[in-house]
Amino acid sequence: GSPAQRQQQILHKQVERAHLRSVNLEHLVRIGAATRGELDQAHELLNERQMALAEYEHKLEPTNDQQIYTRRNQNDLITLDKRLEQLQIKAKSDAIIRDIVVNEGEAVGSGTLLMQLQKNDKVKIEVYLDARQRELAHIGQPLKLHLPNGQVLDAEVTSEPKVMTRLPPGMRSAFDDTSKLLLMVEPVEPLPMEWQLDNLPLTARFPNQVQRWLQ
C-alpha cells in the first residue's frame, strides 16, 4: 500500500495493543494482581492512541474544496468523453485507409474530406468486351490483366455479361459503334495495393481461339 495506508495500519495496531493491555489490567485489578494506577495509565495510553488515529484519518479525508475539485474533474472528463465520442468517425463497412488528407491538429469544417477509404474486400474490375466475342463472356473464363507498369495478372470473369450501348467517357472511339458487353472480373492473385485505384486504365486480354482449344 501507499505510505499513508502503512502509517494508518501502524496506528490501528497501536490502538489494538493499548486496548488489549487495558482489558488485561482490568482483569488483574479485579483479582488484586495490579493497581488502579496502572489501569488508569493504560486507559490514558488507549485514549492517546485512539486520538492519534482519529486525527490522522481526519487528515486523510478530502476537504470540501478538494471534493468540489474532484467532482469538477469528473464532470470535465465525462464532458470530454462525450465530445470525443461525437468526433469518432465510423465507416459504413470495414475498409482500409488509403490516404489521410489532413494534418494532425488541423482545424476542419463540416464536410471536409479527411481520408480516403478502400473497401476491404476483393477487387472487382469492369471489362468491356466486343459483343461479337460473346463466347468469351461466361463466368470462370480466364484472362490476363496488364497493369500500367507492365505486370501481368491472371484473372477470371465473375459475372454474367451486361449489354452496353455506350462506353464510359474516355473509352469511346469515333469509329467504334458496336455494342459492348460489361463483365465483372476479379484477379486470381492479389492486386498490388498501389494499383487499387478507381478508374485505373487496365488492358484485358482474352485467350485466342488456339489458346482456348489448348486449354
Image (cartoon, grey):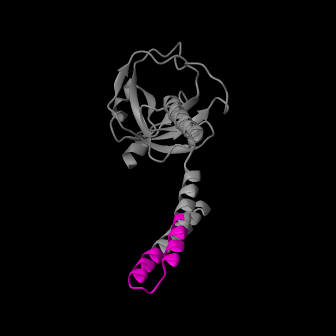
Q: Which residues are drawn in magenta?
A: 20-47
Residue at x 33% of width, y 38% of height: 139
- Residue 125 left/right relative to 6: left
Residue closest to the eye, 209 or 119: 119
Residue at image x 45%, y 79%?
25
Which quadrant of the figure contains the N terminus?
bottom right
Q: Position of residue 87 (x, y in %)?
A: 53, 29
Left or right for 118, reference 93:
right
Q: Position of residue 131 (x, y in %)?
A: 38, 24
The image position of residue 31, as x and y in percent, is 38, 85
Q: Nearer the viewer, residue 99 or 152?
A: 99
Residue 1 visible at all: no
Judge by depth and name the residue closer to the eye, 51 or 10. Answer: 51
Between 107 and 115, which is closer to the camera in this rendering? 107
Please determine whether, in this image, residue 134 is positioned above or below residue 120: above
| Total labels drawn | 0
- Magenta span: predominant SS is helix
Horizontally, is 167 left or right of 158 in the view? right
Residue 6 on the magenta segment: no
- Res. 121 image quadrant: top left
Residue lying farthest to the top in this orientation: 174
Asked if residue 46 can be seen in this view, the reply is yes
Vertical placement of 188 versus 91: above or below?
Answer: below
Q: Tell me where residue 152 sits by quadrant.
A: top right
Side of 91 where 111 appears, left or right: right
Q: From what the image shows, is residue 166 above or below residue 182?
A: above
- Does residue 33 show up magenta in the picture? yes
Residue 102 spot, x, y in % from top left: 65, 29
